[in-house]
Amino acid sequence: MAEYVLNTWYPIAWSRDITQSLAQRRIVEKDVVMYRNTQGKVVAQLDICPHRMLPLSHGKLKGDVIQCGYHGMEFDCSGKCVRIPGQDKIPAGAKVTTYPTHEHMGLVWIWMGDADKADPAKVYDLPQYHDPAWQAVEGDALRIECNYLNLCDNLCDPSHVSFVHLTTLGNAASEDVPVQSERTENGVLTWRWVLDSPAIPLFQKFGGFTTNVDRWHYYHYTAPSIAVIDFGTAKTGTGAPEGNRDDCIQIYACHFMTPVDENTVIDHWLHVKNFKADDDTNKAMSASFREAFSEDKVILEAIHKNEKAYPDFKPVLLNLDASAVRMRRLVDSMIDAEKAERQSVKAA
Amino acid sequence: MAEYVLNTWYPIAWSRDITQSLAQRRIVEKDVVMYRNTQGKVVAQLDICPHRMLPLSHGKLKGDVIQCGYHGMEFDCSGKCVRIPGQDKIPAGAKVTTYPTHEHMGLVWIWMGDADKADPAKVYDLPQYHDPAWQAVEGDALRIECNYLNLCDNLCDPSHVSFVHLTTLGNAASEDVPVQSERTENGVLTWRWVLDSPAIPLFQKFGGFTTNVDRWHYYHYTAPSIAVIDFGTAKTGTGAPEGNRDDCIQIYACHFMTPVDENTVIDHWLHVKNFKADDDTNKAMSASFREAFSEDKVILEAIHKNEKAYPDFKPVLLNLDASAVRMRRLVDSMIDAEKAERQSVKAA
Amino acid sequence: MAEYVLNTWYPIAWSRDITQSLAQRRIVEKDVVMYRNTQGKVVAQLDICPHRMLPLSHGKLKGDVIQCGYHGMEFDCSGKCVRIPGQDKIPAGAKVTTYPTHEHMGLVWIWMGDADKADPAKVYDLPQYHDPAWQAVEGDALRIECNYLNLCDNLCDPSHVSFVHLTTLGNAASEDVPVQSERTENGVLTWRWVLDSPAIPLFQKFGGFTTNVDRWHYYHYTAPSIAVIDFGTAKTGTGAPEGNRDDCIQIYACHFMTPVDENTVIDHWLHVKNFKADDDTNKAMSASFREAFSEDKVILEAIHKNEKAYPDFKPVLLNLDASAVRMRRLVDSMIDAEKAERQSVKAA
């Protein structure tokens, strides 16, 4: 079993997909059964009946209680066993681990660590998501068979778009433009500007840019599994690099990642943009993103296979890896801090 | 490799399926090649040519001799090598392990332990199977991807039918009726009576019960891999609980299990009942059983996956597990006794 | 990881399949990217970008340079990195292992060991391949899911054809004819003559033999992964056993094996014969070989599975195994010699 940051809010499902019926998700190597209770609150519990280990998601939702599909044991929203058919006494072990959840930005967030540390106010927020002048468009839950940290690498990395996403998010103009990197309070920021050159295909198509532009790419990574990419474009000469964004188009491409296990990640992606478009246009833009992310999926899955097949291979670091190195160091330090805290709690 | 009771008669195949041609079965992690010889006796041998390890079932049956499909070595019904093409001398190691078999109740039984202990008189018997007033109807060989002991749990467990088999073998009337359990000479007996309540769907359909009934469920487990469930129904008030079974319908649902390996069991199931019916009715009854057992299969395979995925999970015991606990203790003691005996033979 | 002879020329691909585009092959547990450069020379490199481990075969061939599909790093035919987009300095580790290759007899041969020992003059040669009186007909690249040494066993073994290939390469006449075996300079020779008996089906069909023949089967194994089978047929009484081959038909069936990994081998097979035929006849002969080799594939894969499933099984040796024993001893000694040499180089 790999190690994960646990005391954090992870995105686990689109809110739209969690209804008054049992659904299964998987995160940090645990299966989770989920449903929306009669008060509309999302319940998330370890998907194992404590009796015979049947997944509770094989059972029935009866009001706000899950009835196990094997012997009819019933568990309420808190995980407490409220009925054992044929038996009055409820043993102490008859309970189900229940995880705090919170809904925000169209997603269900889950807290897999110490429940008493779960503070909904600390769920990640992008202010523009709520701004009526902007528009949010939800994408998919893309499953990629790789470690989530490799997807984080990819999302701390503006360089690859010049080679991987030539029909959507990148073009040759940026091939040789170096990237900048710095640690932020909770993550890593990576960025570059590409000046006085053709717009990327996505913005040629949806922004109508036919002359040269200045464009920015700010990759905001928030540990351990969130990446929000602020990228935008303005005509060259309108002063965008100096801060004037009056006549630009700008998108926050959000990636809310679920670390399923060592070999799988699910990327809940959406975009938030500074202009409103009709449904058809939004669908077309999502299709472009979907095309780009499927290109990443192919690459990340091939890399993951090679990492498994050649465990002793020593890769070489390039300048463009500065953010990825910072990102992994940060995640490792968070895991170590949690371990140290658990040790000290035990010792006390 | 898991440990198994070896000095016992295991069911391995339907007699109807073993003809004068080579068939492969698998039991206690060994592949076995089987055929019916010219005297009508079933031959069962380790399915590995001692020369190059080609499965003998890839070869040809020539009379009562298997010819290996690679170099033509021939082995008789006793496993003795009777020909090596191009070579006169038969080396001592050129022989095939051969297992005792016996046919009984429509099944081939095999003895995987010390051949000199194999006594056909000790094969399991259900007297009603041979009673002309009763009728036996053979079912399937149902493959379930779980450990055979988990299927034994299921077949020492009357409780689950109230939740798993609502369209066939159970109904809500029995949800809260506790079960009784006791050790028997070679196994475990588990039972309960459900009084003055609606008949189960199977008996409503095939017994025509429209008013309330008294019904009994006796689960006879014989170690290590046989379960026979005696269940029957009589109109309430006719004295069934006191022993009067004059006007009841009664079925022995037999489960003859083959422990294939740690992750697979094959359930040869049949039913023996106290009334005769035409072919169509018998097929319809078998279809009901098939439906019920396919429900068990789904549950047992899901549990098996969770047991593999969460090896450290500590399940909680309920009252209804008393028989399963006795069953596993009994099987463990049989395995331990065999090991001790083998040790003492070696030491002597 | 298994051990392999490394300082040897292995066949890895048909020349016809390596063009000016990226192809992937696998040998001795390494993935290899291959292409034909603008000078027509075959380039073979470890199929891993040293940066992020993406297979280079996912990239683009730009002239004689592979551009990695993730960040655009470029590597030339020698494995040297010639460009890192966005970065001027090329780190020392930015290079790709490159393997010597040589084309011969329609195949690409690769040297996976010490490059400075690779001498193209030492690639295996069959003189008849170049003889204008003979005709070479290329077959397939047959993938078999077994260890390559088990295929070598099979190709040091004239005995099995009497049982496995009854419609093509063998018949019952040879069942009891013992085989001879001896070590040669670089391999093992195994042979037998079958006198005054019906021709094998292949030669009945393509040689038109209707009366009894004398036939020879010389299996030339060259370590570690080449087998060439010289087999031919002449009418009985024409003096073939004494050396007169004036009126015979003769075929060298060549097997150039790629040891992919412990569980997989690819057999590049072709035949070279002392008569010329039209395309249709050659295709029909290849179809017969294909049929025979697919019979071997079934057997070898079944054996491989049993070897994995029963690691403690002790097979018995027969006289016919003398060549296989010599073959394995030879391969082991070559591997040991290489290890000893590597040790002494380190120590020096």
Image: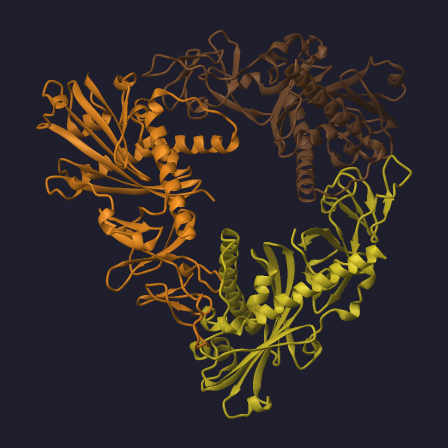
Chain colours: A yellow, B brown, C orange
Q: Quadrant of residue B85?
A: top left
Say whether residue B60 is left or right of residue B35.
left
Can residue B8 be seen here? no
Quarter location, residue C269: top left
The residue that appears at 25% across and 46% down in the rendered structure is C123
Q: Is residue A51 left or right of residue B117?
A: right
Q: Is residue B118 above or below residue A148?
A: above
Q: Nearer the viewer, residue A254 or C57?
A: C57
Q: Quadrant of the C terminus of chain A?
A: bottom right
Depth check: give the residue in front, B225 or B329. B329
Does residue A329 lie above or below C219 as drawn? below
Image position of A294 (left or right of C63):
right
> In front here: B25 or C187?
C187
The percent coordinates of residue C149 (x first, y second) are: 38, 36
Which residue appears at 70% of the width and 67% of the height? Answer: A106
* Residue A307 point in image, percent of width and height: 52, 56
Residue at left offset 40%, top offset 44%? C340
Which x, y percent locates residue C267? 33, 40
**Residue pictured at 32% horizontal, 63% vertical:** C77
**Residue B156 % position (x, y):** 76, 27
Is residue C264 or residue C299 the one in the foreground? C264
